[in-house]
Amino acid sequence: MKWVLRFASAAVLALSLAGGANAQGAFSAEDLDDLQRVNQYLNGLGFLTGRFVQISDTGGGYAEGTFYMAERTRLRFEYDPPIPLTFISDGYFVGIDNSELETTSQYPIGVTPLRVLLRADVDLTSDANVTAVERLPGQLRIVASEDNGLAQGELTLIFSDPGLELRQWVIVDAQGHRTTVALQDVLEVDTLSRDLFRFTDYDIDRRDMFD
């Protein structure tokens, strides 16, 4: 189960570091143009759904599931059985529902690196952390790193290009563990139910936070 929890943490890290950027002013004009394209893409995301596959280089970790995204501020990664976990961001808290144990672990977004992604505007050219822009045939890769705190590690966001779309991310954590998350069958939809982004929590009812 530990590797699955690391998968969920990897989802948080990847999506949170997507708001990071270079503070060293070392980018070329082409790099900056590509970062601006990614800014426009991320800030324009609406309602998405699809499948995901996650692979870890330790413990034979492999998992699949379904993901949902609502206007970039609300997220849900729902693991296929027999894994009983669902990662949720409701716009206020991030955490994991465990349907087997009937427990929910929650953290305020403001004390996690995910706050960077969930702000009003993503700007990769002005916030610190992006260290490289890499171009491969059919791909654009953005590398971000963090030396401190919950997000410590390195993230590579991989986009298809041309036709810019986020396809996968690769995370190397502070211990050197590598996790790859690949998005598949991504569809843009008109809307998604807000119930998808509510925690199963029998002690605290936060439904009014969406109203």
Image (cartoon, grey):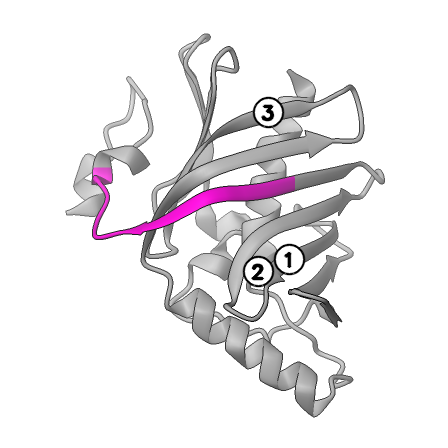
- Disc with the residue nearer the chain's start (1 vs 3): 3
What residue is shown with label 3?
A: 63
At numbered mark 2, what does the secondary structure look like: helix, strand or loop? loop
Mark whose residue sits in front, 2 or 3 = 3
Q: Position of residue 194 (x, y in %)?
A: 22, 40
Which stretch appears magenta?
A: 181-194
Q: Is residue 187 above or below residue 161?
A: above
Q: Is residue 106 left or right of residue 46?
A: right
Residue 119: mark in rendering:
none
Q: Amino acid at mark 2?
A: Ala
Image point (22%, 44%), residue name: 209
Nearer-N-terminus badge (2/3): 2
- SS state under label 1: strand
Residue named by callout 2: 18
Q: Secondary structure at mark 3?
A: strand
Q: Are the residues at dot 2 and dot 3 in contact (C-beta closer than 8 Å)?
A: no
- Residue drawn at x 68%, y 20% is 2
N-terminal of the two: label 2 or label 1?
A: 2
What is the C-alpha distance between the residues marked 2 and 3? 22 Å
Q: Position of residue 205 (x, y in %)?
A: 23, 28
Name the residue type under label 1: Leu
Task: Say which of 202 and 82 sits in front.
Answer: 82
Q: Residue furthest right?
A: 176
Q: Does residue 28 sit above or below 15 in this rendering?
A: below
Q: Is residue 80 left or right of residue 145?
A: left
Residues at circles 2 and 1 in contact by the CB criterion of under 8 Å: yes
Is residue 52 highlighted in magenta?
Answer: no
* Tag 1 residue: 157
